[in-house]
């Protein structure tokens, strides 16, 4: 839909259906803006004018400079969103589209008092183009993963495991009962070791016995267990 603004009296907007895309810039002092004259530039001559801030569909911002006519004025401004303006029944001499932050004239519209007939659109510097940027990929959440080494697999499921490979076993204390199984080994043990050896087999021998008595008792236990 074409944006439409009706400007009256040199400082009053009576109609604006642009949803903020075209805004009248209020002067720092007074009711009328001042802008350097862009035609017949003899010295630095300034004109009274109304200045509108115009935002194009692509995000570019320009200014529309409407010279002030003493004794009142009535201007209808229409904009297609792409920098093309029309001014139905305009009785001004000229209107300029200028840069948003300089006095550079980009486009000038000359009306019948100057053109002698139809509205003349003079493109000087042209409208600034918005440089397209490559779309950025959405942010990706980085998830830290800790890899835990797998335990040694069973030989039945690992094709590289041979029958001769011995599975790893956790270190553990070797019981004295599993190692010492002969009478000769019992003879080398101290009294305390004999008591411990018998206790592991479930025999609680009398601590007050002599070593010889304990040795005989342990030999009996060993023979019974074999």
Image (cartoon, helix red, strand yellow):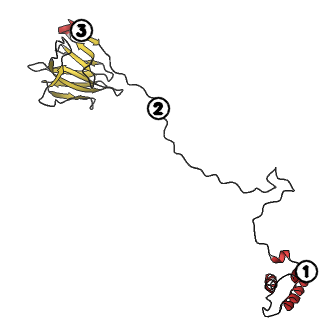
Q: Secondary structure at mark 3?
A: loop
Query: Which one is closest to the eye, mark 2 or mark 1?
Result: 1
Task: Give me the C-alpha separation between circle 3 and circle 2.
Answer: 43 Å
Mark 3 = which residue? 118
Q: Residues within 10 Å of mark 1 (few under 14, many from 20)?
A: few
- CB under 8 Å between callouts 2 and 1? no
Considering only order in the chain, which callout, 3 or 1, is on the residue closer to the N terminus?
3
Is 181 displayed left or right of 154 in the figure? Answer: right
> Is residue 226 visible to us here?
no
Q: Earlier in the sequence, mark 3 or mark 2?
A: 3
Depth check, mark 1 against mark 3: the one in front is 1
Q: Position of residue 205 (x, y in %)?
A: 80, 90
Outermost residue, top direction? 116
Q: Disc number at residue 135?
A: 2
* Distance in Å between CA atoms under marks 1 and 3: 130 Å
Identify whether 216 is placed above or below 19. Answer: below
Residue that appears at 57% across and 49% down: 144
* Nearest the eye: 174 or 19: 174
| Residue at horizontal 10 percent and vertical 21 percent from the top | 72
Q: Nearer the viewer, residue 183 or 129?
A: 183
């Amino acid at each position: 839909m074409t944006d439409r603004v009706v400007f009256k009296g040199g400082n009053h907007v009576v109609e604006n259906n642009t949803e903020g895309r075209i805004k009248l810039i209020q002067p720092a002092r007074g009711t009328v803006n001042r802008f350097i004259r862009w035609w017949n530039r003899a010295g630095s001559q300034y004109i009274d004018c109304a200045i509108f801030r115009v935002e194009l569909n692509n995000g570019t911002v320009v200014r529309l400079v409407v010279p002030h006519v003493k004794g009142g004025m009535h201007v209808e401004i229409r904009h297609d969103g792409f920098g093309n303006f029309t001014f139905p029944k305009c009785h001004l001499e000229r209107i300029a589209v200028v840069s948003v932050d300089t006095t550079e004239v980009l486009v000038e519209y000359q009306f019948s008092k100057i053109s002698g007939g139809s509205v003349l659109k003079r493109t000087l510097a042209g409208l600034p183009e918005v440089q397209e940027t490559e779309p950025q990929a959405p942010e990706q959440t980085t998830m830290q993963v800790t890899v835990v080494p797998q335990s040694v697999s069973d030989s039945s499921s690992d094709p590289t495991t041979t029958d001769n490979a011995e599975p790893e076993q956790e270190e553990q204390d070797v019981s004295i009962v599993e190692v010492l199984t002969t009478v000769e080994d019992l003879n080398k043990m101290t009294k305390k070791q004999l008591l411990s050896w018998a206790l592991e087999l479930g025999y609680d021998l009398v601590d007050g016995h002599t070593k010889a008595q304990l040795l005989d008792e342990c030999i009996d236990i060993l023979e019974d267990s074999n």
